[in-house]
Image (spheres, helix red, strand yellow):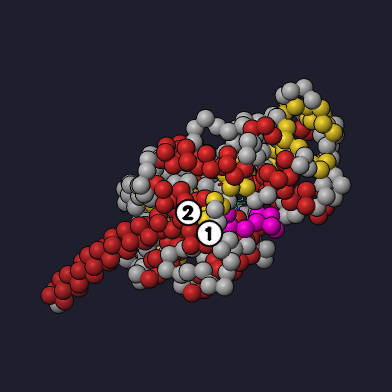
């Protein structure tokens, strides 16, 4: 049951010690709670700051943009030109290159947070969030961890909840027969930094998305011998066409032509520039690259140099995996490879279904059910940013819509509350 004072005070903390390993208290938030301090969470926070709306950001890691700071490899650069990756109201520095490095992107995000005075609450993981129909409020339970104190459980109570935990919150680790017998080193691509430690090693890279391709390229550059598993099909596109970014070209063409025509043009251009990739084991899907992204969320690969290594045989493309055994992998075509290490570039997923007690607005996969540009607003003050498979540019557009919508309701409710308080005050005075 909520304490009645919670509804009157702008920001109030109640504490009650339960005497178990957790100490518990409730916090009433006069404004939205934003979950996640990645680019999406920061962009909403900046929009709210500009409009004078108070908020709290909860972040499980000990820093902003933890995906970029802790779970990406060293050679990573933005794949799209910087004008498509900047957050609202804060351009990239002019001296940044067209495709900033991950370090430049992180420093940009740090300046963004500083510029708008955004201070997330770090080391605080949201465990559950549920709408309380009786009170018309969201109740968000977290665990706060810090090395110096024992974990504490906190409940936040608010009118608006912004989900900004990302489409790539958790790694996907498929099960493979015999993997426990393998004996060599196994890691997910989110823990891979560089190929330095793999010099001279035979490495199996599972997956041929942007991560799998780039990890394989990096391994080659460090004189390792990668074999890359391509179990189905993949669209590989050049990063640039005639000196212009392929993404920019697609965006311009889509203003004039239907998506299926743009898809046909992209595939023809890819064939002209990259040649026939199918003869190297990279089968193209029958659905076009943009349609596939929209329908299945499968991102086309933008070639950063891996194709050259595939053509020269330095990256060995192999089909799907049948089973692992000690130091070996058997493939579906019956071939057996001896390998020292395995890197699982098998992708990521959303973690929303594990904590948000709601299933109308978000799908079972934790992605917005409504496609872009309508995937940002749910019922009862629920919002989502960065869940429509549009990367940073989609997240920025969502963030603008979300911050305006919340600011509008927050201002109306604040005005209404002030009127109610003034009326009560007048009634009290008239009784004397
Ligand atoms: C290797 C890699 C490279 C990429 N490169 C590009 C690119 O060049 N261009 C592009 O547009 N997109 C790129 N993406 C996609 C990228 O994920 C997004 O564009 C961007 O990071 C999305 O921002 P976000 O804030 O929505 O999610 P995230 O960056 O994932 O941030 C979500 C935050 O929420 C926090 N969080 C999660 N769960 C909880 C919880 N329960 N409680 C509290 N906090 C929580 C996480 O710790 C994280 O800090 C890339 C993705 C990967 C994996
Ligand atoms: N610089 C950049 O911009 C950059 C760099 C890296 C990543 N990213 C982005 O980050 C997101 C995630 O990319 P990602 O490459 O990590 O993941 P991804 O695009 O989801 O690719 C996962 C790959 O793993 C394969 N896979 C999954 N399970 C498998 C299994 N059991 N056996 C064999 N193969 C399996 C998939 O094959 P199937 O297709 O057959 O399922 C796919 O090739 C994407 O949006 C991507 O664009 C961006």
Instruction: State the residue at coordinates (62%, 47%).
Output: 303
**Can you identify the residue that label 1 sits on?**
81
Q: In this image, 106 relative to 14: left or right?
A: right
Report the residue marked by disc 2: 248
Classify mark 1: helix, strand or loop: loop
**Element marked by disc 2:** helix
| Image-based side of 121 in relation to 29, left or right | right
Q: Which quadrant would the C terminus be assigned to in this image?
A: bottom left
- Residue 82: percent from left, percent from top: 52, 62
Residue 422 sits above or below residue 363 on the image: below
Q: At which x and y percent is residue 220? A: 78, 48
In the depicted structure, whether residue 329 falls above or below residue 27: above
Magenta residue span: 72-81
| Circle 2 residues within 10 Å: few <14, some 14–19, many ≥20 | some
Dot placed on the residue nearer the N-terminal end, 2 or 1: 1
Relative depth, front residue between 158 and 261: 261
> Which residue is found at the position 52% from the left and 39% from the top?
268
- Along the line of sight, the residue nearer the viewer: 30 or 108: 108
Residue farthest toward the left in the current orientation of the protein: 430
Judge by depth and name the residue closer to the eye, 175 or 230: 230
Report ligand 2 position as a quadrant: top right
Along the viewing direction, whichever of 379 and 323 lies nearer the viewer: 323
- Inspect the magenta stretch and tell me whether residue 78 lies in it: yes
Q: Is residue 153 visible in the rendered structure shown here?
A: no
Q: x, y (%) of residue 320?
A: 69, 29
For disc 1, the neighbor class at 10 Å (few under 14, some 14 to 19, many from 20) is some
Q: Residue at x 43, y 51 (%)?
A: 251
């Amino acid at each position: 049951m909520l304490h009645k004072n919670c509804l009157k005070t702008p920001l109030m903390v109640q504490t009650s010690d339960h005497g178990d390993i957790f100490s518990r208290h409730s916090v009433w938030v006069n404004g939205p709670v934003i979950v996640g301090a990645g680019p999406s969470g920061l962009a909403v926070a900046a929009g709210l700051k500009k409009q004078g709306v108070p908020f709290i950001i909860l972040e499980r890691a000990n820093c902003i943009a933890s995906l970029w700071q802790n779970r990406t490899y060293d050679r990573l650069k933005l794949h799209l030109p910087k004008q498509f990756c900047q957050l609202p109201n804060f351009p990239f520095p002019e001296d940044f290159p067209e495709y900033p490095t991950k370090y430049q992107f992180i420093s940009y995000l740090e300046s963004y947070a500083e510029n708008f005075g955004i201070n997330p609450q770090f080391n605080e993981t949201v465990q559950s969030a549920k709408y309380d129909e009786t009170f018309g409020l969201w109740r968000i339970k977290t665990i706060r961890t810090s090395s110096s104190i024992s974990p504490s459980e906190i409940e936040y109570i608010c009118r608006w909840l912004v989900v900004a935990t990302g489409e790539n919150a958790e790694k996907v680790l498929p099960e493979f027969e015999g993997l426990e017998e393998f004996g060599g080193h196994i890691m997910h691509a989110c823990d891979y930094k560089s190929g330095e430690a793999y010099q001279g090693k035979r490495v199996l890279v599972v997956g041929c998305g942007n991560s799998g391709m780039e990890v394989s390229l990096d391994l080659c550059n460090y004189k390792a011998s990668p074999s890359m598993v391509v179990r189905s099909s993949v669209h590989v596109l050049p990063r640039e066409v005639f000196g212009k970014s392929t993404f920019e070209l697609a965006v311009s063409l889509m203003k004039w032509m239907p998506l299926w025509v743009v898809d046909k043009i992209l595939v023809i251009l890819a064939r002209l520039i990259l040649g026939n990739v199918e003869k190297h084991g990279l089968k193209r899907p029958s659905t076009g690259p943009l349609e596939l992204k929209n329908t299945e969320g499968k991102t086309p690969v933008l070639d950063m140099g891996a194709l050259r290594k595939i053509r020269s045989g330095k990256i060995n493309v192999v089909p799907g995996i049948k089973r692992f055994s000690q130091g070996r992998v058997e493939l579906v075509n019956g071939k057996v490879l001896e390998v020292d290490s395995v890197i699982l570039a098998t992708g990521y997923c959303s973690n929303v279904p594990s904590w948000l007690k709601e299933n109308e607005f978000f799908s079972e996969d934790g992605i917005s059910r409504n496609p872009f540009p309508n995937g940002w607003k749910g019922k009862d003050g629920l919002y989502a940013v960065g869940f429509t498979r549009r990367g940073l540019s989609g997240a920025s557009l969502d963030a603008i819509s979300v911050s305006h919508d919340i600011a509008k309701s927050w201002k109306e409710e604040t005005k209404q509350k002030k009127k109610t308080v003034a009326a009560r005050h007048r009634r009290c005075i008239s009784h004397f």
